[in-house]
């Protein structure tokens, strides 16, 4: 959107996001640590100031613990920020809205690729677009939709299962 407006191209961007972060009912799995150069990236790539009001804790460095020794990874003045990921996701969505994107809270369910357009089906209706960008993380269902309809192929990745045990 930034590059389009710099070139004077009028873009209508629609973000299809199945989750609603505001009410904390949905979330993306994440501890919420934003590592450097997150503030610089937000600024340079998206023209956004880092949302310091969302920071719960500032992290100066890390320690890697091995069997025989531990290695301290010192930040040398660059810091990480601990946030609640849902708050950060909601912040990014809100900033996208402010920049003119339309947010549709619905799940993408199917795609139809045509020569000069793409038909996008979601749980609340369908849309016609010139281009679709898949930014679905490791969502199994979305991977299948894109694999079945485009040349996209799922990369190899480690499958992780998250368990929270309250002592
Ligand atoms: C347990 C755990 C802890 C982690 N901790 C950290 C950490 O502390 N710091 C860090 O930097 N990284 C962390 N990560 C990694 C980080 O979460 C991912 O790298 C990051 O979320 C990937 O971003 P993404 O935008 O590619 O995908 P995602 O964050 O998964 O975003 C994809 C979005 O697409 C939406 N979506 C997917 N399919 C559909 C569909 N069909 N219809 C509508 N919407 C859809 C999803 O709802 C989601 O909001 C952690 C990961 C895990 C598993």
Image: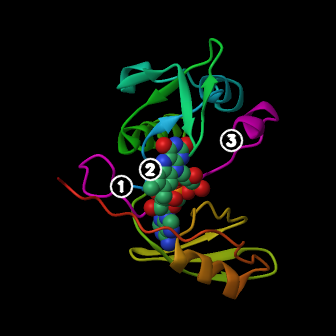
Is disc 1's CB within 8 Å of ligand 1?
A: no
Within 10 Å of the Cα at label 3, are there few (<14), some (14-19), or many (20+) other Cα atoms?
Answer: some
Q: Which residue is mark 2?
A: 30
Within 10 Å of the Cα at label 1, are there few (<14), some (14-19), or many (20+) other Cα atoms?
Answer: some
Q: Which residue is mark 3?
A: 1
The quadrant in which residue 18 appears is: bottom left
Q: Nearer the viewer, mark 2 or mark 1?
A: 2
The residue at 24%/59% (across/down) is 165
Circle nearer the N terminus (3, 1): 3
Which disc is residue 27 wearing? 1
The residue at 77%/37% (across/down) is 3
Is disc 3's CB within 8 Å of ligand 1?
A: no
Element marked by disc 3: loop
User: How is this picture coloured?
Assistant: rainbow
The reply, left or right, for residue 152 in relation to residue 36 is right
The reply, left or right, for residue 18 in relation to residue 70 is left
- What are the residue bounds of the magenta stretch? 1-27
Magenta residues, dominant SS class: loop
């Amino acid at each position: 959107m930034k590059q389009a407006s710099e070139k004077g191209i009028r873009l209508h961007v629609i973000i299809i996001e199945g989750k609603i972060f505001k009410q904390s009912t949905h979330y993306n799995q994440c501890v919420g640590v934003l590592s450097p150069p997150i503030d610089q990236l937000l600024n340079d790539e998206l023209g956004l100031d880092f949302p310091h009001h969302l920071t719960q804790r500032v992290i100066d460095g890390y320690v890697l613990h091995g069997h025989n020794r531990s290695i301290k990874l010192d930040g040398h003045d660059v810091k990480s920020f601990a946030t609640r990921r849902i708050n950060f996701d909601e912040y990014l969505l809100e900033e996208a809205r402010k920049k003119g994107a339309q947010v549709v809270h619905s799940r993408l369910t199917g795609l139809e690729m045509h020569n000069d357009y793409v038909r996008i089906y979601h749980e609340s209706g369908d849309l016609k677009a010139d281009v679709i960008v898949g930014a679905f993380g490791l969502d199994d269902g979305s991977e299948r939709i894109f694999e079945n309809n485009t040349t996209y192929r799922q990369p190899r990745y480690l499958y992780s299962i998250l368990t929270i045990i309250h002592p």
